[in-house]
Amino acid sequence: MRISGKGDMSLIILIALTSVLQLKNFNPENYSLLCLGDSYTIGQSVKTNGRFPEQTVSLLNKTKSHFESPTIIAGTGWTTKNLIDAIEKNNLQQKYDYVTLLIGVNDQFRGIDTAIYAANFEKLLLTAIKYADEKKNHVIVLSIPDYGVTPFANYSCASAELISNEIDTFNSINKRIAAEYKVHYIDITAISRKAKDDTTLLADDGLHPSGKMYMLWAELVGNYIINHTR
């Protein structure tokens, strides 16, 4: 290229600097998110874009990161054993940048022994760590929401107080195991209990969270991931 003068040289330098800055801010990598759980993860009674995994990805994609649509293994009514069986059936081969685990409400609801829950939860957490390529700080455990504050609880055989106490017991188990394996733990139970005074946090079925509540969860998950994206 023939340079005719100082003006042309300045233009070339400007173009070069712009290219460097663009390359510095360009992140071609796509990140992945795997979400394991039950109805709270599959988003029973809300639209797909209202579920917390999708809302988390939507929030993250407003940053410089780019996340693919989340992979979800979850189902309404699933216990820890159901989730274990489903994971084995899916036989996922890839690794994920981040993995969330939220499971246990149906173990509590069905009266499954806490020792069985603890053993199954630990197995699931080890699986989550494996799918996160052994990066423990890329695994996020969410506490079990408290459905004792929902209208559904009025039709339950157990009192709201008993449900809440049992949820606390199950959460003490998953929190302890999460701490043992040094993964990140997010308490969403406190948020779920706000539904007692704010019905907009509940879906139309009077039991599951609304998109509004899921957004509150997504913000907590998303903020953690933003601060730990490599």
Image (cartoon, rainbow, N blue to C red):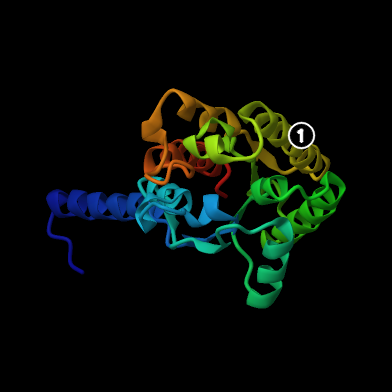
Q: Residue furthest top?
A: 197
The residue under the point 16% across, 49% down is 6
Residue 170 position within the rendered picture, expressed as x and y whole percent measured from the top left:
74, 39
In this rendering, does residue 41 appear at all? yes
Q: Nearer the viewer, residue 180 or 165?
A: 165
Q: Is residue 23 left or right of residue 153?
A: left
> Which corner quadrant of the image does residue 39 belong to?
bottom right
Q: Is 152 above or below relative to 106?
A: above
Q: Is residue 118 left or right of residue 81?
A: right
The residue under the point 83% across, 41% down is 180
Q: Is residue 208 left or right of residue 135?
A: left
Specify the quadrant that holds the N terminus. Answer: bottom left
Q: Is 198 above or below relative to 104?
A: above
Q: Is 12 above or below relative to 194?
A: below
Crowdedness near tag 1: few (<14), some (14–19) or many (≥20) residues, C-alpha within 10 Å: some
Residue 175 position within the rendered picture, expressed as x and y whole percent measured from the top left:
75, 37
In this rendering, does residue 93 appear at all? no
Q: Is residue 216 left or right of residue 116?
A: left
Residue 72 position within the rendered picture, expressed as x and y whole percent measured from the top left:
53, 63
> Which corner quadrant of the image does residue 166 belong to?
top right
Residue 8 position within the rendered picture, expressed as x and y whole percent measured from the top left:
15, 54
The amino acid type, in three-letter code, at marker 1 is Thr
In the picture of the structure, the residue carrying the numbered disc 1 is 169
Q: Is 143 above or below relative to 115?
A: above
